[in-house]
Amino acid sequence: MFEDSTFTLPRTMLWSFWLAISLNFLGGTVGQLHPREPAQYRTLPSLREQALILDRWRDERVARIPELLKKYNVDAWLVILSLPISQREYAEDTIWWSIKDATEFASHRRTVLLFHTNSSSLAGSPNPLRWVDNTGQVWPELRSTLRAYNPERIAINVDRNIAFGGGLHVGEWDVLHEQLGDSWMEKIVNQPMIGIEYVANRVPGQLQYYKMLQETTWAMIEEAFSEQVIQPGVTTTEDVEWWYREKMRFLNVSTWNHPRVSVITPESFPGWAGTKDTIREGDLLHVDFGITAMGMNTDTQHMAYVLRASEGETDAPVGLKEGLRKANRMQDIALEKMQAGKTGNEVLKECLTQMDSEGITGQIYSHPIGDWGHAAGAVMGELRILPNTYYSIELYAYHFVPERNETLRFRIEEDAYWVSDKQGWQFVRGRQERFHLVNWASNLNVQALQIQ
Ligand SMILES: *[C@@H]1O[C@H](CO)[C@@H](O)[C@H](O)[C@H]1NC(C)=O
Ligand SMILES: *[C@@H]1O[C@H](CO)[C@@H](O)[C@H](O)[C@H]1NC(C)=O
Ligand SMILES: *[C@@H]1O[C@H](CO)[C@@H](O)[C@H](O)[C@H]1NC(C)=O
């Protein structure tokens, strides 16, 4: 999904990095291909089976937390999940959504979790220690646990900028202060990377299902951007957006963002609202949408060309194909430069230099994806790119299209996963390298046959 930075967040907080530079294009494309076979709609397991799978993934992720505490040099992480009374149960810490049981939909009691490093007096105890409480008994117990364990640095979620490390409700902060007193509060630290890495972390079992979600996403695009859904001169971009929504209902998946379908023109950017056009022959179409299922999200942008079937056209104009090729080359550059451990700024600079040397103008704005459409572990400023996570590679290339005498933005987005230090990132289901074609001629033929 494209977010206009000035509209949503101050630039320093962007869950994305982006850049702009100019010139002309040289290289061909390497990298992962457009799948040869059409995508199929994939059926997910029953909800009951999904719940078992989701809780297993959650347990695997939670088991990594003690390592994370050591990595960031803290002894404990105190997570307070909600205040039960006074109708405050909908002010959950953002972390709650990534830690809850699959069958929980709101946190009904104050839940206090104390993650620890398994050392000294807590070695071998459950991790986290958990209090679910309506009565206030949690506080004396927590104090006595802390006295025995004696952590030097206790992280809590109070970061000013990052939701995944800043979800402690201000009312809970007051209660915590009151109950722990100054001597423990002096040991409190802000370390948002614990929450960020916890939410960003993928486990191997997720990939198989993420691939299914990606294939379903592609299958939807292939159907939407075809003569099965679009009749030139009749169907509007909004009709196609609602087609996506209804199709999701049919497929038992939901979304985190209303689909946006646009006719690409020099004026149609940024397109975070889609355009309101009747689709015509010769249009370059764009979709930006994602689906949500099994605690994961997708975010994909593809383009389509509406053949001038009434004039016998059978393929997209060369100028458009070259624009897509240029955007593909930018994907190669982004994946190559996004090595884990580099900061967002380092990646940005390297992409910029490479694009410059190849004479490509455009913007890249990638973001983590996973538990959320815009997930934790952002490539921004001095934050480092994390491995074991998914990223959405979102970008556009400018390209002058001689056939139309105009410069257009070729906007594509695919989700990638971390394979290994050696292999780096790979697209979960390849990438778009050719236009989806709306070919109304085939429908004209069908109608002609029916008339006979
Ligand atoms: C959606 O859920 C219904 C009810 O469980 C099921 O019959 C149907 O096959 C599902 N559809 C898809 C495409 O998975
Ligand atoms: C911490 O202790 C628990 C309980 O003994 C154990 O299951 C877990 O593997 C330990 N974690 C680490 C990182 O040592
Ligand atoms: C192409 O567009 C430019 C500027 O929009 C215009 O000045 C020029 O006349 C156009 N060329 C043709 C061949 O239409």
Image: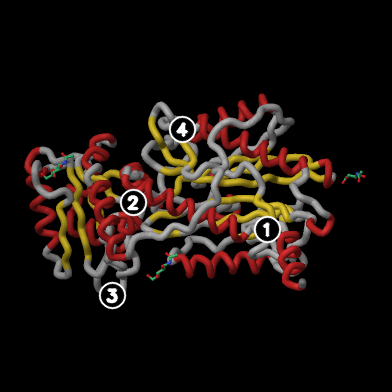
Q: Which mark is residue 158?
A: 2
How far separated are the C-alphas under marks 3 and 4? Answer: 43 Å
Residue at left offset 44%, top offset 31%: 424
Q: Which mark is residue 262?
A: 1
The C terminus: image quadrant: bottom right
How far separated are the C-alphas under marks 1 and 2? Answer: 40 Å
Q: Sequence-wise, which precedes: disc 2 or disc 4? A: 2
So how many labels did they put on this image?
4
Q: Is residue 335 above or below residue 293?
A: above
Q: Which mark is residue 199?
A: none
In front: label 4 or label 1: 1
In front: label 2 or label 4: 4
Label 4 element class: loop
The local crowd at label 4, few if under 14, some if 14 to 19, many if 20 or more residues have their Cα within 10 Å, is some
Disc 3, disc 4: CB below 8 Å? Answer: no
Q: Which amino acid does the dot numbered 4 rest on?
A: Thr
How far separated are the C-alphas under marks 4 and 1? Answer: 33 Å
